């Protein structure tokens, strides 16, 4: 079946550093989403991307829809302690409203 | 807006018992999704509805699982009989139109002993 691979799986960074993570697939997707999940809560939508090459920002977060439509990237600038959590990408299967979620990147920020 | 409301937040049950999870989507949303999250398999889509009608249930693991949406403001996911391998966090999510991002509820943590 279709799978989304996220990397890195986890990362420790110092407060103030920039963070980059990515999501790759063997399949083409029409929409990419990025979510953040805090412990004990459901994922919260951060950014949605709808066109290949699209670059979208939400505050300190910037995400890009890869040109090949098989990947997406999320950057967090000047990380702060509340950025801690698990970040998930999700790609929409063409012709459906089904999203496949990635394996997640666990971010830990050292103050 | 109250968001997507799920109940209960936690459920502990014995193997073989029936379990019913409940979801109230955001008012006006026409799509509703049920997901399951485990460490091993991550977030898996079980089933989704559009205007109360099930559209795709191919992710439902087996016949022990069933989902209903009797009206636009309520959905249930039932497991009967429950098994220890059903232990997971079950999320409900809703959206207006299915193509953009969903809003997730806080989930129900199910433990089957």
Image (spheres, coloured by chain):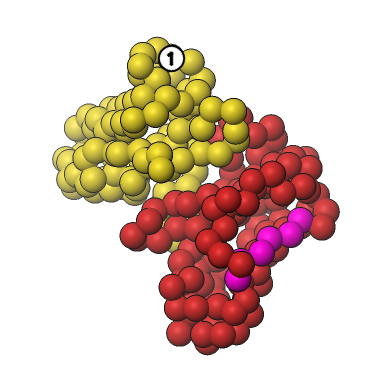
Chain colours: A yellow, B red
* Chain letter for the residue marked with disc 1 in the picture: A
Q: Position of residue A51 (x, y in %)?
A: 48, 15
Give the magenta-colored segment's residue range: B64-69
Residue denoted by label 1: A52
Lateral position of residue A90 relative to residue B3, left or right: left
Tell me the residue at 69%/32% (across/down): B97
Residue B12 image point, x, y percent: 52, 81
Q: Main secondary structure of the magenta part?
A: strand
Q: Is residue A106 magenta?
A: no
Element type at marker 1? loop
Q: Residue at x 59, y 43 (%)?
A: B103
Quarter occupied by residue A4:
top left
Task: Decide whether residue B67 is among the magenta residues.
Answer: yes
Q: Position of residue B77 (x, y in %)?
A: 65, 64
Viewer-proximal residue among A14 and B3: B3
* Quadrant occupied by the N terminus of chain B: top right
Is residue B21 visible in the rendered image? The answer is no
Would residue A37 be visible to someone looking at this image? Answer: yes
Left or right of A14 on screen, residue A70: right
> Residue at 58% of width from left, 50% of height from top?
B58
Provide residue B15's location: percent of width, then percent of height.
51, 85
Query: Would you call the spot at circle 1 few (<14 residues within 10 Å), some (14-19), or many (20 or more)?
Result: some
């Amino acid at each position: 079946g279709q799978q989304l691979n996220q990397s890195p799986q986890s990362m420790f960074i110092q407060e103030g550093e920039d963070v980059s993570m990515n999501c790759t697939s063997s399949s083409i997707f029409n929409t990419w989403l990025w979510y953040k999940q805090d412990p004990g809560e459901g994922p919260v939508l951060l950014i949605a991307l709808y066109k290949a090459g699209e670059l979208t920002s939400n505050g300190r977060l910037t995400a890009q829809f890869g040109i090949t439509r098989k990947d997406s990237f999320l950057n967090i600038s000047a990380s702060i302690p509340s950025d801690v959590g698990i970040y998930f990408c999700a790609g929409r299967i063409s012709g459906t409203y089904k999203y496949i979620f990635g394996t997640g990147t666990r971010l830990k920020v050292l103050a | 807006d109250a968001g997507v409301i799920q109940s209960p937040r936690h459920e502990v049950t014995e193997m073989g018992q029936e379990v019913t999870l409940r979801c109230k989507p955001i008012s006006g949303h026409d799509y509703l999704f049920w997901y399951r999250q485990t460490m091993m398999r991550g977030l898996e889509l079980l089933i989704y509805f559009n205007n109360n009608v099930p559209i795709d249930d191919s992710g439902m693991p087996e016949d022990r699982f069933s989902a209903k949406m009797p009206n636009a403001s309520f959905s249930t996911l039932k497991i009967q009989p429950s098994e220890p391998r059903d232990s997971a966090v079950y999320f409900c999510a809703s959206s207006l139109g299915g193509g953009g991002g969903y809003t997730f509820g806080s989930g129900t943590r199910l433990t089957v002993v």
